[in-house]
Image: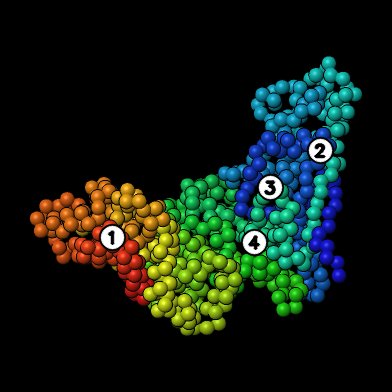
Amino acid sequence: MSSQKYSVNQHLIETLLSWVKTGEIAIPEIQRPFVWDATKVRDLMDSLYQGFPVGYIIAWRNPTVKLKDGSLAEGKKVLIDGQQRVTALTAAIAGQQVVNQDYQQVKIRIAFHPLEERFEVANPAITRDKSWLPDIAPIISGEQKIHKVGKEYLSLNPDVNEDLLYDRLGKLCDIVKKQIGLIELIPDLDIEVVTEIFIRINSKGVVLSQADFAMSKIAANEEFDGNTLRKAVDYFCHLAIAPEFYPHIENNDADFAKTDYFKAMRWLRNENDDLYDPSYSDMLRVAFTSKFNRGRLSDLVGLLSGRNFETRTYEKHIEETSFRTLSEGVSEFINETHFKRFLMIIRSAGFVDKSMIRSTNAVNFAYALYLKLKRDLGNNPNIESWVRRWFVMSLLTGRYSGSPESQFDKDIKAVHDQEFTDVLAAIEAAELSEAFWQVGLVQNLTTSSVNAPALHVFWSAQVNLGDKGFLSKDISVRDMLIHHGDIHHVFPKNFLKKKGFAKGKYNQVANYVYVQQEVNIKVGDKAPDKYIQEVFEQCDTKKAKYGVITDMADFETNLADNCLPLELEAYDLDNYEAFLQARRERMAEKIRRYYFAL
C-alpha cells in the first residue's frame, strides 16, 4: 500500500481557470471575502509575465460518493490554500468581480504599459493615458482580439514600433500559458493528516483549523446550497460584532437577503449585546454538537463528504442529510429566542460582562446543551438551572481547556444516551467532591492571576447573590463589573511592597475586592488594620470617611458578603498569610453555596 498522501503537478493557468469556471475546482470563501490589496493582484500578474514562480496551491479532492442507484460520482477539488491567488487570477484575467471586505461586488482592473512592460492598478489617470491598456482581462481572455487591440493602440500612439507592440501583447496573452503548482491531497486522508500537511507546507505559519476545512466543504457544495449556508454562518458572526453591517448585506447580497436565514438574523441589526460574540468556529461547533450528538469537527467534515463511519464508504444520501441537519442546527443557533434566552441564563448565573468568561468553549458547550435539551425536553422548567450548573461546573473544573473536542464528544454522547440528571450527578460526584470544595478549589484560588477562572466564578457568585462592593452600601459588585470598577487590595499593594513583599504575594487573588474608585483612593496605601479600625469608628461616630457605611450591622454584612473577617487582628501585617488562607476558604465556601443554588 502506497504511503503517498498527495500528488504534485504543474498546470497551465488557463487549465486552472477552466476548472474554476466549470466547478471542477471549488473556491470556498471560508470566512473572509477577498482580502488582497489590488496591488498584490498587480504583482501576481507581473510575476507571471516575467516568468517568476508563484508558489503552489493546495487542493483536497472530495471523495467519490455512491449515489442511490449504486453508481459513483467523482468529487470535485476543494481549494484549501491559495484561495486569494486563484481569486486574483479570476479577477484580473477572467474579469470576474470579487466580494470585498464590505461584502460589495467590485471589479479589479489591472492596466498594462506595453512599452515599459509595467502593470498598475487602473485608476482615472491611467485610464486617460493613451500609453496604457486600462484592463488586461478582455485581452488575455480573448474577448478582445490582439490585432484589434494593437491597431487601436497604434492609432493612439503612432510612434510606437508595431513589431515591438505585438510582441509585448503576445507575451501578455501568454500569461495563461504559464504554470502554477498544484498539490492535490488524496480524498481518503483524515482531516488531522490534512491539517498536518498544510502546516508543514505553509511557510507563512498560517494554521488552518478544522472549522476552516468544514467551511471549505460547506462553501464548495452548490448541490445542497452550501454557499448560502456558509454565508449564514459568516454574516451572523459579522453582525453579532457589527450590527451596522446589516444594510450592507441587504443592499449588496439581494439573493441572501431573501433567505429564511437572513430573516432569522434580522434581530441583530439593533443588537449591541457583546457577552457572546461567536466566531464561525464557535457557531459551527455549537450547531454540529447540538444536532449531530458528536463533538469532533473532523466528523462534520466527513459527514459533509457523505462518509458512512461504519462501512467507511461515501454515500450521497449521507451528504445530503448532513447538509440538511447542519442547516437546521445553524437555524436553531441564530434563532432570536434561543440566543437571547441562553444569554439570559448565563447572565442569571452572574456572568454580566464578557471579560468574566475565560473559556469560550465552556459557553459553546453550554449553548449546544441548551439547544439539545430544549429540542428533547421542550419547556422543562429545569433546563435553565441545568445549563447554569453545567456552565459553572465546566469553568470551575477547566473541563474544556485541555482537549475540548474529545470532551465535547464524550459529554454530548453521554447527554444523548442517558438521563441528564444522571449525567450531571455523576460528574458532580467525580469532579466536585468534598475534597474539591475544601482543598482543590482553595488551591485554585492560591494564585496572583486576575484571569483565574475560580476568581471570576467567585465574582459571578457575588453578582448572583446581590453582594455590594467592599465598603459600599448601595453600589453592587454587578455594577462595578459592568462599569469596570476598581479592584482594590485589602492589604494595599504599595503598603506590602514597602514591607518587602514580592509581586506574587501582594497580588494574591484572595487580597482582591471590588471597590468604588473614591473609596480606593481614600484608602490609598494605609495599613489595613488602621483603615479597618477607622471604619469601625465611623460606625460609632456616624461620620463617614470610607464609603457611606455608618451602621455596624451593615459593616458586618458587607464584610461577610466579601468573605472578609470581622476581627481587627486579622488585618495585622503579621497575619497576612493566615488572612489569605482564611479568605480563600470563605471564597470557596461561597462559591459552593452559590453553585448548588443555581
Estimate the spatial distance between the alpha carbons at disc 3 and disc 1, rounded to whole Å. Answer: 55 Å
Residue wearing tag 2: 52
Q: Is residue 507 above or below residue 65?
A: above
Q: Quadrant of residue 289?
A: bottom right
Q: Nearer the viewer, mark 1 or mark 4?
A: 1
Residue 112 pos. (x, y %): 76, 29
Q: Nearer the viewer, residue 345 or 252?
A: 345
Q: Nearer the viewer, residue 122 or 594?
A: 594
Q: Which residue in the protein does label 1 denote?
A: 574
**Dot 3 or dot 1, earlier in sequence:** 3
| Image position of 394 with respect to 220: above or below | below
User: Which residue bears the numbered disc 4?
Assistant: 210
Q: Amino acid at mark 2?
A: Phe
Q: Residue sitting at 69 percent across and 32 percent down? A: 121
Q: Which mark is residue 204?
A: 3
Rate crowding at label 4 as few (under 14), some (14 to 19) or many (20 or more) other CA atoms within 10 Å.
many
> Which badge, 1 or 4, is on the more N-terminal residue?
4
Q: State which tag comes first along the sequence, 3 or 4.
A: 3
- Can I make out residue 88 in this image? yes
Residue 90 x %, y %: 74, 44
The relative height of residue 15 versus residue 421 in the rendered view (above or below) is above
